Amino acid sequence: MTNPTDPGAIVDRFLRLMAVKDYDGALPLIAEHCHYHNMPMEPVIGPAAVRAVLEPFFAPTIENEFVIRHMVTDGPLVFAERLDRHRLATGWVELPVTGIFEIHDGQITAWRDYFDAATLLKQWPALGALFS
């Protein structure tokens, strides 16, 4: 059985909840002082700000999958190489992402996602306003 306080298990649970847009289940895993930086956008702090960034992004998605390719933990740090898949009315958008999470006291205290915006915009041009 997986330890529910293990940093890797926390990140896995968070990503599974976010994939189905369960904000009420996922956001308690985000600390009030969590620093979220979804490169290249400006960083935000706290669960409400994370929701304000992600809810509009996920709004047009019919289905989401976060396929974890590799996950490595080192104490409170979790490195997750993923393929983020978002199904829109026009088909699937796929984006390779590397996320780095810091976990303390059972919550995510820092989260940085790195990806190539051009790869995303080529498949989902309507997001262009987010990156300008």
Image (cartoon, rainbow, N blue to C red):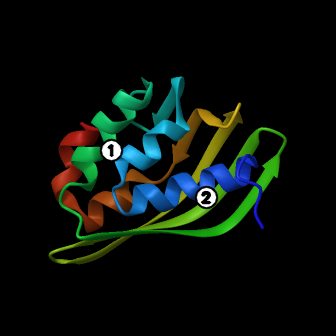
Residue sitting at x 42%, y 31%: 47
Tell me how far mark 1 sits from mark 2, CA to CA: 17 Å
Position of 132 with respect to 32 (left or right) is left
| Count of numbered circles on the image | 2
The residue that mark 1 highlights is 54
View extreme (front): residue: 1
What secondary structure is found at the residue carrying circle 1? Answer: helix
Q: Residue 34: where, in percent of width, then height? A: 54, 26
The residue that mark 2 highlights is 12
View extreme (right): residue: 75
Considering depth in this image, is 67 or 11 the residue closer to the camera?
11
Position of 94 with respect to 132 (left or right) is right
Q: Residues within 10 Å of mark 2 (few under 14, many from 20)?
A: some
Q: In which quadrant will I find the N terminus?
A: bottom right
Residue sitting at x 64%, y 50%: 10
**Residue 59, image quadrant:** bottom left
At label 1, the amino acid type is Leu
View extreme (bottom): residue: 91
